Amino acid sequence: MIVSLHVKNMALIEEVEVEFGRGLNILTGETGAGKSIVLGSVNIALGTGNFRDLVREDADYALVELVFHSEQEVVRKKLEKMDIPQEDGEVIISRKYKNGRSVSKVNGETVPVSFVRELASELLDIHGQHEHQTLLYPKNHLGILDEYSGQELAVLLKQCSEQYHTLLQARRRLEKAQADEASRAKEMDFLAFELQEIESAALKPGEDEELEAQYRLMANGQRIMEALSETGSLTGCGSDSGASDAIGHALRAMNAVSGFDEELGGLCGTLEEIESLLNDFNRGLADYMDSFTFDEQEMHRIEERLDLLNRMKAKYGKTLEDVLAYQREKEDRLEVLENYEEYLARLRAEYEKSERNIRQTSKEITAIRRQNAKVLKAKITEALVDLNFLNVQFEIQFESLDKPCDHGMDAVCFLISTNPGMPAKPLGDVASGGELSRIMLAIKAVMAEQDAVETLIFDEIDTGISGRTAQKVSEKMAVIARNHQIICITHLAQIASMADQHFQIEKHPSGGKTVTTITQLSEEESVTELARILGGAEITQAVLDNAREMRELAERTRKGRSV
């Protein structure tokens, strides 16, 4: 349930904080006082509204914060998935708007607005002023029935959606495969040409890298030999001059005196190691120079081979491994084309199997829908009678679709007749705006019996009704409020009188500007507000007495006593 709403710098609201309670929370006020701002602020907090339309012009920023208390497992799991901490079932959703940007947070952690919307769907359900218009569209009727049908149907619908995706893929593969014979022959010829070109190249993975290394060596052969020759002359490789000869003379000189001092002996040993290392180097250098050859014909062969490999990579893949993978793919494709009738038969079998599967699932879905439709029809009819549709006939009509889709093979339409002897017709053909509003309330009342969502918000559910019908609507609201928290914006005293908590929205001047405030009313203040709604500009004692009596009658109704 919603514990509190905090709004700052939104339209006429400078700053208000409202603490809601359990049961029926009623908000009333004069037209234009700012009731729509309250609902707009809630929508913004939940990620479905736009800040730009409501932020005060004189404010640096705007803030909307909703505090919920929820023990629902699904809410806890969603928070855990986002690594958001939760203590004592508290969920705080806040959205702040500043410098043209909005930031959304849940329990202090910044989150994308999409997550706010996802979380909000588990916490509350908002029935706006025009939501009843959705009843004009039969596609929404199927959604209501499916929601009522519960988890058993939800599992099948998920399975059906996956099967429909599989069916579409099978259909696309089959349609793509059913090309004309000329196109197939043309593709086979082209594939054969590509494969012959790749096969004749006799590619080996890594061959290009090895050849490139050899080519680099050959291309720099002269430079390498010049460097080696110069190095050999300096180190004394193959000659009696150079570093080798000089070190030999130095070593003989050191040997002559090394016996006079232990330290000289150590230096002499170091010089012997240097001579040995240099001799090893010179031998290695001589071997390399002897083995190094430059074959112009071999270099030309490597150059041509590299050109071929690079052409293959330019046409068929970035690496030789990619080219070979392309070859295997096209070999598989050519095999398919050469055995095309078998391939087509296999695709047709896959498509037919997919269609059989989804049709079977759709059949099970239809059975569950029809079973639940009987119960839903009876409950909605009962709720409509409670809402002063005295001679109502309500039907749920089924039609079978020609082809399966992601939600089965059913089309559903709600039919109604409010006059005896008249056949039931689609809601859009016979129901007025006020009637649609009551029908939606009846549906909400029925759905609330099994709905895990704890809070329902109704924005002016009283559209187009008055008198006894308004009284019936108020009684139905009180029934729903026994198991749910209800927040309702209304203009009717009959509905307002049922409030467990009554809030007044007022607009008044303050510091040279107009501001909106929200005040929770005491019992006596609630009676005065009911009198204002009943009496208009002048509130007489008779009107006050009437309001007090209405409040007392509502109290007895809420407690289940006879009126």
Image (tube, helix red, strand yellow):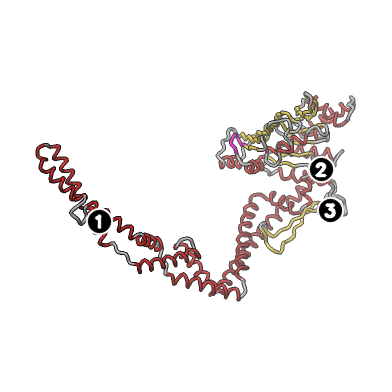
Disc 2, SS? loop
First reached walking from the N terminus: tag 3 or tag 1 = 1
Residue indicated by mark 1: 285
Taking 195 as reference, is 277 left or right?
left
- Secondary structure category for the residue under label 3: helix
Q: Image height check: is 145 above or below 175?
A: above
Decide: is 105 above or below 186.
above
User: Mark 3 highlights which residue?
Assistant: 429
Q: Quadrant of the C terminus?
A: top right
Q: Quadrant of residue 31?
A: top right
Q: Looking at the image, which is closer to me, 210 or 304?
A: 304
Instruction: Name the mark nearer the viewer: 1 or 2.
Output: 1
Marks 3 and 1, how far apart at CA:
102 Å
Residue 161 percent coordinates (x, y):
63, 56
Q: Which residues are magenta?
A: 105-110
Q: Quadrant of the N terminus?
A: top right
Q: Residue at x 15, y 40 (%)?
A: 266
Is 79 above or below relative to 324? above
Question: Which x, y percent locates residue 384?
Answer: 80, 46
Position of residue 479 relative to residue 238, above or below, is above
Within-10-Å neighbours for mark 3: few <14, some 14–19, many 20+: few
Q: Nearer the viewer, mark 2 or mark 3?
A: 3
